[in-house]
Image (cartoon, rainbow, N blue to C red):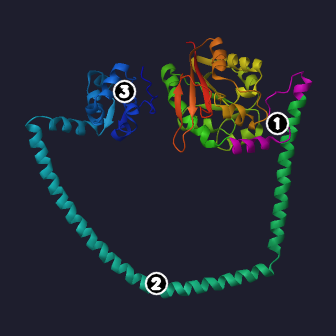
Amino acid sequence: MMNLPQPDILNQSDYQLAELLVGSNEQFLVNAYRAIVRRLPTEEEALAWLADPRLSGDRLMMLGNLRYSPEGRQCDVAVRGLARSYWFRRLQQLPLLGRAIGWFFRVLRIGRLEAKLNQTKLRLNQAEVRLDKLSQQLAQLGPRLQTRIEEQEDRQDSALQCLKVDSDSWRGEIAYAIATLRNEWKVTLARDSRAIEHAARALAEGQAVSAWAPPALAREQLYLDFEDTFRARWQVEGHAHWYMPLIRQVYDETATLKPCLDIGCGRGEFLVALKNNDFPCVGVDLNPAMADAARAQGLEVVVADAIAHLRGLDPGSVAVVSAFHLVEYLPFELTLHLIEAAKRVLIQGGLLILETPNPENLVVGACTFWYDPTRLRPLPPALLKFYVESADYESVRTARFTRQQPGPDTVTIDQPVLPSVDGPLDYAIIARKAS
């Protein structure tokens, strides 16, 4: 059974020819079928194309044959630049007429080349004239530049003397620094007061303080600094790009206008990817410092406990629920509650994404997972998949991400992996709510 890659383009009504000619043979084949006939190739079609070196060596002809097949004409997808090149190539393949057409175009091309050569010579002559004029102008500007440099040096000397004499400017800077420190202290005090009030209110209502809250009550900024140090933005952004076609498929199939909800959104990298692809989106995070960092990018973020926020939403009010590096912070019972609460708020056919570090990589399970002391335990892929399947989700799949430097991650779907030191670093459980 062939293991073809996922398509890396979105469904559009028209494409540029160059967009569909890139990538490996397998990626090109998947992209061509997805773009032109709106489906993936069957295994027989893929084997027939990849096994014939004449077909796989001429991508233009393959695109043309697919586009002007009965199925391609029915889908009627526009590929700019394909028709002229394809039919000209077909004409050249005719026994006698093709040779005559080829000879005619070679003669025509020679004439065009001679005309371009004459134009180039004319432009070179004009450039030489301009260079001569520029040289004369530079020779005239030399003395003026020297005079201006001397004037600038005199002005700098005068400015230095003014700085030495006028000490009031230093007093102003010191006063500004003191005011800045006072404002930062007020912000810190307000943030700490907010955290203390939240904890006091929870205790007064008989609720337990969340076990996966940021580690220090008065150091919300500390956790943001931790994320910047140990989880680079490019790692999240690289994964986010891979999910966009799956989310686009949900919106195409359901024709919904409901938003995507990213719980534990952190600095908002996934929200940025959703916004750049025109998906409505909202983030939820318990850390106000994280929420402020996301809001600074123009994102909509709610400061709340993830499960409590899900329980407060109406049923069927969300198209996609995503949680990146969150479930490893939750006790067993809360993980099950999160999965059930997400299913309640998802629309029929909605998408659930749960991404977490992969303990099949022994370095992750034994070392890098524990960089964050607030994590409780790593979750093996089979176990988390079992949780989701037990909640009656459909099409439950496991995607494993193997980091590639400097290119994009390699993603495999439902491919078993033995524990090793070089296995995929992260994995995601992807599922659809039953429709």
- The percent position of residue 243, horizontal first and vertical second, equals 54, 30
Q: Which residue is mark 3?
A: 33
Precedes in sequence: disc 3 or disc 1: 3
Q: What kind of element bears circle 1?
A: loop
- The percent position of residue 410, horizontal first and vertical second, equals 52, 34
Relative to residue 407, is residue 286 drawn left or right?
A: right
**Which of the two marks, 3 or 2, is nearer to us in this view?**
3
Q: Are marks 2 and 1 in contact (CB under 8 Å)?
A: no
Relative to residue 289, is residue 185 drawn left or right?
A: right
Q: Is residue 108 above or below residue 84?
A: below
Q: Amino acid at mark 3?
A: Tyr
Q: Which residue lies at the image location 88% right of the left edge and 39% below the top edge?
A: 193
Q: What kind of element bears circle 2?
A: helix
Is residue 42 something one can see in this rendering? no
- The percent position of residue 382, horizontal first and vertical second, equals 63, 19
Residue 217 belongs to magenta span = yes
Residue 347 belongs to magenta span = no
Spatial CA distance of label 3 from label 1 is 49 Å
- The percent position of residue 210, horizontal first and vertical second, equals 82, 27
Range of magenta residues: 201-230
Relative to residue 373, is residue 421 drawn left or right?
A: left
Precedes in sequence: disc 2 or disc 1: 2
Report which quarter residue 138 is drawn in: bottom left
Q: Amino acid at mark 2?
A: Leu
Q: Which residue is mark 1?
A: 215
Precedes in sequence: disc 3 or disc 2: 3
Spatial CA distance of label 3 from label 2 is 63 Å
Q: Are marks 3 and 2 in contact (CB under 8 Å)?
A: no
Q: Residues within 10 Å of mark 2 (few under 14, many from 20)?
A: few
Q: Which residue is mark 2?
A: 141
